Each structure stands twice: as C-alpha cells, then as structure tokens.
Image (cartoon, helix red, strand yellow):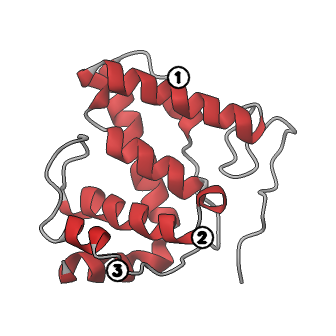
Amino acid sequence: MSRPDTLATNHADDCPLCGAPEAGGEDGCRRIFESVLAKEYSDPAFGKVLLITVDAYALQHGDAHGPQSNAFHLVRLCAIVEFGASPVIGTREPQGWREMLEAGRRLPEIHLTGSPGPVTVADVAGATSAAEHVDLVRAWGRSVWTAWEEWHDWARRVLKDL
C-alpha cells in the first residue's frame, strides 16, 4: 500500500505533502523552507543543524523529490539521528559515503506509506532563538525518522556496509 498523493488536511491552505498548517499549500511550504535555510546559511548558530533541515524537508516532500532521493536522505538522517553524525554542512561524511554516491550505486526507490510525522518546517520557522531553532530541528528530524520506521533496518544496513 502506498501513501496517497496528498494528505487529508484540515485546511485548504495546508501543505498537501507534509501537512504543515496554513503554509500556503506546497509552494508556500517551500518558501517557508527556503526562509529557514536562509537563516541557517547566514548564521552558524542556526546552521549547526542544516543537514537535518534538508533531510527532514526532503523526506516529508518525497513525492516531489523522488524515491531515490528519499533513500539518500533517509540514510543520512539515520547517520545523524541514530549514530551521532554531524548535521553541520561541510563536515566529513562517513567513510565510503562519497564513494557510494560517486560510484553510481543504485539506491532503491523507497516511499513513505504513512504519515510524514507531526513536526514540520512550519514549526521550525516559529523559533525565536538559535537554541530553540536547534531543538525544534532536532525534534523534526526525530519525528521524520520515526515516520519512516519501515525503512529503518534498510538504512542501518546501508550505513553498516559503507
């Protein structure tokens, strides 16, 4: 069973992919994401969780990014959430990570079959300080990781094989 193309949301302005309330639909949700990224790129105190932001957003909008993109982002989110990899952009990836990508290793097409998780980019956008932002992004990452539970064993095996 695959997830429907859109979520049943309570309001016409909610994001149909992640369920962010009153986000302005999918386009508005993307604008919220871009504003969060702008803050993370411009201030290191916010940017120390940038990779979680990218992975969580991509996985909650997997229908827009594609099933192989889902696999990449899920493996990286697993490395961060479960194994303590750094969520700072530009930090060293696990050994074998780049080789896996550059060698063209075919990642499987994976899909989310349930809810994308209760925390969304809209929750993160409301942070009033860098500390709150970091806490919200980490909660978002854990929420998304939990939503993809059926693929956890697969992601762990990929990391083990790197």
How far apart marks 2 and 1 lie (CA) works out to 26 Å
- Do the residues under discs 2 and 3 have CB atoms within 8 angstroms? no
Question: Considering the numbered disc 1 on the image, is that residue within a helix, a strand or a loop?
Answer: loop
Q: Position of residue 122 (x, y in %)?
A: 59, 33
Looking at the rendering, which quadrant does residue 63 occupy?
Answer: bottom right
Task: Please provide percent x and percent y for residue 12.
Answer: 87, 39
Q: Is residue 154 above or below residue 111?
A: below
Query: Where residue 105 is drawn, which disc sits there?
Result: 3
Q: CA distance from mark 2 to mark 3?
A: 21 Å
Q: CA distance from mark 1 to mark 3?
A: 38 Å
For the question of whether residue 117 can be seen, the reply is no
Q: Nearer the viewer, mark 2 or mark 3?
A: 3
Badge 2 local density, few (<14 within 10 Å), some, or many (20+)?
Answer: many
Q: Quadrant of residue 117?
A: bottom right
Q: Earlier in the sequence, mark 1 or mark 3?
A: 3
Q: Secondary structure at mark 2?
A: loop
The C terminus sits in image quarter: bottom left
Depth check, front residue: 62 or 147: 62
Q: Which residue is at a point 71% across and 84% down the rendered structure image?
A: 1
Residue depicted at 49% across the width and 64% down the height: 69
Q: Amino acid at mark 1?
A: Gly
Q: Position of residue 133 (x, y in %)?
A: 38, 27
Task: Please indicate, yes or no, whether residue 111 appears anywhere in the rendered image.
Answer: yes
Query: Quick check: 21 left or right of 59?
Result: right
Q: Which residue is mark 2?
A: 112
Which amino acid type is marked by label 3?
A: Arg
In the rendered structure, which disc, 2 or 3, sits on the residue that comes first in sequence?
Answer: 3
Disc ID at residue 126: 1
